[in-house]
Amino acid sequence: MNAVVAEESVRFPVICRNVRKRFGLSTVLSDVSLSIPKGAVLGLVGRNGAGKTTLIRILVGLLTSDAGAACVLGEPALRMTDASKTRFGYVPQQPQSLSWMSVESQDWAMDSSCGAAFTGSL
């Protein structure tokens, strides 16, 4: 990584340059560019289908963009190291990674990840 890119990634841990994404005939992101400064808080506001979740999924490396570049902590979003991934969190509104599991399996997975089984009543 050259010195200019390294310096920019320290000042701006999240950088997007001309990111584009289409789903079929629908353009969801069209040349999105942003640099989020270190320590900043950013809110993505828009109607349903505006591309907020798509942008976040591209930034965390869960989705590829059709064009442009997305870097987080100085690394391309799709090739972030495990060390970099431990420095941020992403909680989706609807966890798609568990959609293949039965309700009972999801309960077991959640209970075991918390270290204790739920024994109360609702």
Image: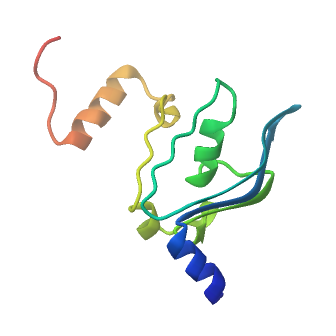
Q: Residue furthest bottom?
A: 3
Eyeballing the image, is 111 above or below 120? below
What residue is shown at x 42% (from left), y 69% (from top)?
83
Q: Is residue 3 left or right of residue 107?
A: right
Q: Is residue 15 left or right of residue 107?
A: right
- x, y percentage for residue 76? 63, 67
Q: Residue furthest top?
A: 122
- x, y percentage for residue 117? 16, 31
- Residue 51 falls in which quadrant of the image? top right
- Residue 54 falls in which quadrant of the image? top right
What residue is shown at x 50% (from left), y 37% (from top)?
97
Which quadrant does the C terminus fall into?
A: top left
- Label total for image: 0
Q: Can residue 106 be seen by looking at this rendering? A: yes
How was the colour assigned to the protein in this rendering? rainbow
- x, y percentage for residue 71? 62, 64
Q: Is residue 10 left or right of residue 35?
A: left
What residue is shown at x 39% (from left), y 61% (from top)?
86
Which quadrant does the N terminus fall into?
A: bottom right
For the residue pair 24 and 102, the one nearer the viewer reads as: 24
Eyeballing the image, is 74 above or below 54? below
Q: Can residue 1 be seen by looking at this rendering? A: no
- x, y percentage for residue 90? 45, 46
For the residue pair 8 and 76, the one nearer the viewer reads as: 8
